[in-house]
Amino acid sequence: MHFHEREIDLVIDEATLQSKVRELGLQITRDYAGRELTLVGVLKGSIFFLSDLARAIDLPVRLELMGVSSYLDGNETSGEVRITHDVSAPMGGRHLLLVEDIVDTGLTMQFLLDNLKARQPASLKVCVLLEKPARTKCKVTIDYRGFVIEDRFVVGYGLDFAEKYRNLPFVGVMRSE
Ligand code: IMP
Ligand code: MG
């Protein structure tokens, strides 16, 4: 028995995640055919999804990373976000696909979209692995979506609880004892 099996219940298994990522990769490959795409991953939660997705896209792809830290209002993001890591090149004129682990309230995503839009990219779209529509405060258009999930706190495949469980190859929930 692995250590996490005492603590985590499965929500989306590894095979289901990987087949969804391949499906998203195919769709993105078709939609961006003939163009150069820049994937902008959001640290740290998107890194496993980003690396699998990038390898499922059959196009010339550039990778960029943005790091953000949310100011909390209670246990929820206030929507005011601080940039802790910025992209390494100008984003003007590029086709950008923002890659994020989860859209919960949507406030982080809205901040990132406003920030990237101001740099005048050629296009700007959104790809998220998980969406929790029950908690949406700020409706952002999601162009590529992995899974819609219930309002439960999930971990794994990049998502953490107090920085733990990011390296699980599946998505799960903390078992409530
Ligand atoms: P927002 O509420 O949409 O702004 O989401 C802010 C951030 O909270 C996301 O980018 C995630 O890093 C984190 N987050 C939201 N829901 C979950 C969850 O269920 N598990 C782990 N992290 C989450
Ligand atoms: Mg995140």
Image: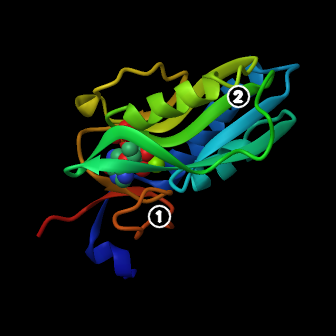
Residue at 54% over, 56% down: 44
Dot 1 lies on which element?
Answer: loop
x, y (%) of residue 65? Answer: 67, 48
Q: Which residue is found at the position 50% from the left and 55% from the top? A: 14
Which residue is found at the position 85% from the left and 27% from the top?
Answer: 36
| Disc ID at residue 96 | 2
Give residue 139's position: percent from left, percent from top: 37, 20
39 relative to 160, above or below: above
- Kind of residue sitting beneath label 2: Leu
Q: Please say if 92 is above or below 56.
A: above
The amino acid marked with disc number 1 is Arg
Mark 1 nearby-residue class (10 Å; few <14, some 14–19, many ≥20) = many
Residue 177, quarter of picture: bottom left
Q: From the image, which quarter does the N terminus lie in?
A: bottom left
Q: Could you say which quadrant of the image residue 39 lies in?
A: top right
Residue at far left of view: 177
Residue at numbered disc 1: 166
In screen coordinates, is 72 left or right of 38?
Answer: left
Residue at disc 1, CB closer than 8 Å to ligand 1: no
In the image, what residue occupies the spot 84% across and 33% down? 59
- Residue 112, position in %: x, y? 53, 33
Q: Secondary structure at mark 2?
A: strand
